[in-house]
Image: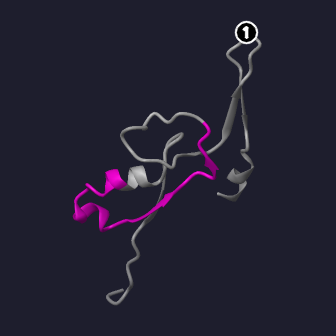
Amino acid sequence: MENEIRRKPRILCLHSFRTSGRIPQKMISRWPESVSGELDLVFADAPFPAEGKSDVEGIYDPPYFEWFKSDKVQYNTPLVIFTNFDFFVFI
């Protein structure tokens, strides 16, 4: 065990709705090397380009991405239909 190769824990870092993987990557870059250097962090972008306004516009530069699509139904209800979840089967 003395010559055993130690692998860093790999962590998938997912961003929030209508943002990008660069945003958490930029935030985590402020962590001390003693923490971040012990981890293999993987930052992914969602598969769909954002089709609406992002809450981070003016704070972080585009492009922004979405994990799924949503359409609000206009029948006097708060119903929202979510689509394009197919890619989740591959995660």
On screen, residue 18 versus residue 4, left or right, reads: right
Callout 1 amino acid: Asn
The residue shown at (68%, 51%) is 88
Residue 78 location in percent, x, y? 67, 16
The N terminus sits in image quarter: bottom left
Residue 74 position (above or below residue 47): above
Q: Is residue 69 magenta?
A: no
Residue 72, picture quadrant:
top right
Along the viewing direction, whichever of 42 and 45 lies nearer the viewer: 45
Name, please, the residue furthest toward the bottom.
3
Colour scheme = one colour
- 39 is within the stretch colored magenta: yes
Residue furthest top in the image: 76
Crowding at label 1, few (<14), some or many (≥20) Cα neighbours within 10 Å? few
Q: Position of residue 23 (x, y in %)?
A: 40, 50
The residue shown at (39%, 71%) is 8
The residue at the point 42 percent across, 47 percent down is 61
On screen, residue 3 above or below 28: below
Against 58, residue 64 (above or below) is below
Residue, disc 1: 76
Q: In the image, is 71 to the left or to the right of 4?
A: right
Q: Is 47 in front, or is 57?
A: 57
The residue nearer to you, when weighing 56 against 34, is 56
Image position, residue 71 (x, y; %): 71, 29
**Magenta-drawn segment:** 26-51
Q: Position of residue 91 (x, y in %)?
A: 64, 57
Query: Residue at the spot x=74%, y=21% of the render?
Result: 73
Q: Quadrant of residue 56?
A: top left
